[in-house]
């Protein structure tokens, strides 16, 4: 036992001591960390970490495309990583890690604001600028929110698209298939959709929460189709639930009878638009969202914007307005059969 | 086959191999990732370890007796939901925390009763409760998640005392207690006897059933505690807390030299196994920054470690 304990202590001591010494040797730093190395402050590249809700889905990949474009333009080192399953706890652990790595700015698209708030507050306490993009976090956890479009314009845009496609006088049930019950974006949109629906002749029958999970969304879609005989339309208001709902309608042979509208990327929805199951796809320009986020990050890192600033210059997007602490990207876009093929993201 | 060196002649070769591997991983990591070995960042990132570490203590004892507890992750989920439910209805953190620990204790006691009274195999019992506890948690919460427990509560996981993270301090105290219990008390030695040969242990007057019952109950209580820390860390209680933890914990315990057939294992060994997995994970996610690569590397590591240990043990025997 004694021999073992001695051995352990000795080996731990070696492990901690030896690299600790070599850490300072300049040749090794240059060789292993490359551009990460802390060169003199002025010439050092700004490091920005961009955290999507889910890595690998087309929506966030298209945002990343815009972010990369901006990073190349501004000479920023961009780190893009996120959970592959959308687990907010993994997001929190990634933020903690970037805090230790000492990046300059962290841009978070939180899956669940409360779960990541602790890690974000710690990052801010460590002197790192933290902003949210795509979805907002809790107020004290970030300085700015890059807002793709106001909840008002999205919620009303969705209902208007549905009314236009169905004909404004149509009566019957509609359902909303959301993401998680905790998703801040979706909940805000639902709040603005409710009054808009109340003004129409459509009745909101139920709201489903399949999470960011394609097979659950498909199952929920089938479920509402069989449960509500007078169903006229389904709103799929996440990039996962929209194709799921459209797939469910096609599998049940209700294409044309039950109309699907929602938020997703054009590439994911093209085939449904061409079969007629979907007539309108509502979204914002996701490439521009990523592009603007990196510009805001850069402006924060160089102290070009602070509390109370009302505009920001964002490269090819020109000047964007800042309302309170929300940097506004602009309005929604509606993709239809006529224009959807012109977009590739 | 379990190693026969119990008591004073305990052979430490397995733990030594793991310690050497740990040193290699740390060296490698320090070389690849600048600042990896800084004490400050190690302490901060150790947060990802404590829940596993606490579960691993109970799991080590159970596996030493030749049993297994697959339900720890689900117990965490159920405890978390009870915590959230009690907190939202009573508003009292103290009541919620006690309810959370009590739930863990009860879950463990059910396992223990089924294993010791009904003589069912622990694998079957905990496989059943693994599904049942998670199901109850999901049914009860209906997918709802509870949050906003306040900054004071999140200090349980995020706070530190003289630079030592609070959950780490809790763990070290408990680990010391468990290690002393296991190596210095008669009851601790009984666990090895049960693991080596249950029948012989019974005939020599050891109350195997009572010990089994208390082991599983303890494991449940530890799961309740781990759940409390986990909920505090993410400020969120929902039914999927602890999903998949059972396998990671068993991996760490087995990696640390506890024989899955029972009769062999130590708390320091388990701690080494935990550290090896933890550091490897950190290395993977900090160097490659890839979420999906982690599990592959851990799997490979387990095989390498077991092979290395076998090689050493064969050499020693011949």
Image: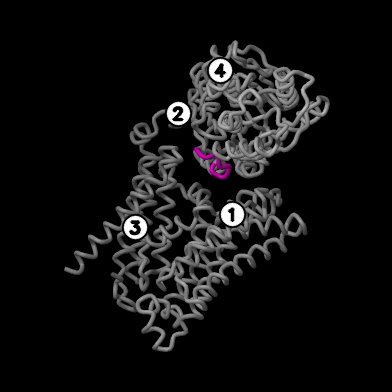
Q: Looking at the picture, does residue B34 appear above or below residue B99?
A: above
Determine if the magenta segment contains residue A152: no
Q: Residues within 10 Å of mark 4 (few under 14, many from 20)?
A: some
Q: Looking at the picture, does residue A194 appear above or below residue B258?
A: above
Name the residue: 56% across, 67% down: B220
Q: CA gap, disc 1 to disc 2?
A: 38 Å
Image quadrant where one finds the N terminus of chain A? bottom left
- Front residue of B157 and A263: A263
Q: Looking at the picture, does residue A224 appear above or below residue A301?
A: below
Which residue is tagged 1?
Answer: B230
Q: Secondary structure at mark 2?
A: loop
Q: Are marks 1 and 4 on the same chain?
A: no
> Which of the two labelled residues, at mark 2 and mark 3, occupies the earlier sequence position?
3
The nearer-to-camera label among 2 and 3 is 3
The nearer-to-camera label among 1 and 4 is 4
Q: Which residues are magenta?
A: A84-90
Q: CA gap, disc 1 to disc 4?
A: 47 Å
Q: CA gap, disc 4 to disc 3?
A: 65 Å
Chain hosting mark 1: B
> Which of the two labelled residues, at mark 2 and mark 4, occupies the earlier sequence position?
2
Q: CA gap, disc 2 to disc 4?
A: 54 Å
């Amino acid at each position: 036992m004694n021999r073992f304990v001695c051995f352990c202590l000795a080996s731990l001591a070696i492990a901690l001591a030896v690299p600790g010494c070599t850490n300072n040797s300049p040749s090794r730093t240059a060789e292993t960390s490359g551009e990460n190395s802390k060169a003199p402050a002025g010439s050092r590249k700004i490091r920005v970490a961009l955290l999507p809700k889910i890595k690998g889905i087309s929506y966030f990949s298209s945002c990343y495309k815009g972010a990369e474009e901006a990073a190349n333009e501004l000479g920023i080192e961009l780190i893009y990583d996120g959970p592959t399953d959308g687990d907010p706890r993994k997001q929190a652990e990634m933020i903690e890690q970037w805090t230790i790595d000492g990046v300059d700015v962290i841009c978070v698209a939180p899956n669940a604001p409360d779960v990541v708030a602790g890690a974000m507050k710690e990052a801010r306490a460590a002197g790192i600028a933290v902003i949210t993009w795509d979805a907002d976090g809790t107020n004290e956890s970030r300085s700015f929110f890059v807002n793709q479009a106001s909840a008002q314009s999205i919620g009303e845009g969705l209902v208007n698209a549905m009314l236009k496609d169905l004909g404004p006088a149509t009566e019957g049930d509609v359902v909303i298939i959301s993401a998680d019950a905790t998703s801040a974006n979706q909940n805000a949109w639902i709040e603005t959709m409710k009054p808009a629906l109340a003004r129409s002749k459509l009745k909101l029958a139920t709201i489903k929460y399949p999470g960011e999970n394609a097979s659950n969304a498909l199952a929920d879609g089938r479920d509402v189709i069989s449960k509500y005989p007078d169903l006229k339309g389904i709103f799929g208001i996440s990039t996962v639930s929209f194709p799921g709902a459209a797939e469910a309608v096609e599998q049940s042979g209700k294409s044309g009878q039950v109309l699907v509208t929602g938020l997703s990327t054009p590439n994911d929805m093209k085939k449904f638009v061409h079969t007629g199951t979907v007539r309108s796809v509502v979204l914002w320009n996701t490439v521009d969202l990523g592009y603007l986020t990196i510009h805001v990050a850069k402006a924060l890192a160089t102290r070009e914007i602070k509390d109370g600033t009302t505009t920001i210059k964002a490269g090819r997007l020109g000047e964007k307005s800042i309302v309170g602490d929300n940097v506004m990207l602009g309005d929604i876009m509606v993709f239809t059969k006529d224009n959807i093929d012109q977009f590739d993201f | 086959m379990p190693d026969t060196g119990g008591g004073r002649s305990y052979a430490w070769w397995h733990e030594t191999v793991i310690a050497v591997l740990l040193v290699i991983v740390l060296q490698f990591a320090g070389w690849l990732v600048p600042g990896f070995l800084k004490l400050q960042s190690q302490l901060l990132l150790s947060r990802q370890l404590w829940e596993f570490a606490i579960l691993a203590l109970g799991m080590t004892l159970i596996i030493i007796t030749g049993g297994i507890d697959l339900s720890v992750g689900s117990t965490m989920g159920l405890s978390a939901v009870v915590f959230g439910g009690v907190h939202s209805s009573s508003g009292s953190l103290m009541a919620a925390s006690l309810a959370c620990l009590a739930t863990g204790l009860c879950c463990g006691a059910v396992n223990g009763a089924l294993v010791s009274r009904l003589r069912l195999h622990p694998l079957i019992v905990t496989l059943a409760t693994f599904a049942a506890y998670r199901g109850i948690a999901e049914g009860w919460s209906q997918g709802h998640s509870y949050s906003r427990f306040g900054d004071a509560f999140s200090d349980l996981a995020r706070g530190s005392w003289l630079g030592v993270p609070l959950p780490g301090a809790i763990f070290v105290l408990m680990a010391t207690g468990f290690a002393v219990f296991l190596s210095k008390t008669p009851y601790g030695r009984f666990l090895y006897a049960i693991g080596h040969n249950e029948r012989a242990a019974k005939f020599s007057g050891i109350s195997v059933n009572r010990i089994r019952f208390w082991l599983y109950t303890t494991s449940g209580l530890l799961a309740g505690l781990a759940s409390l820390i986990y909920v505090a860390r993410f400020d969120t209680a929902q039914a999927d807390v602890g999903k998949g933890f059972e396998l990671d914990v068993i991996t760490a315990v087995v990696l640390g030299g506890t024989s899955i057939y029972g009769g062999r294992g130590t708390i320091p060994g388990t701690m080494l196994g935990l550290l090896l997995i933890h550091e490897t994970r950190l290395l993977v996610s900090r160097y490659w920054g890839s979420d999906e690569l982690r599990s592959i590397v851990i799997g490979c590591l387990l095989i390498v470690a077991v092979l290395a240990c076998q090689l050493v043990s064969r050499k020693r025997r011949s």
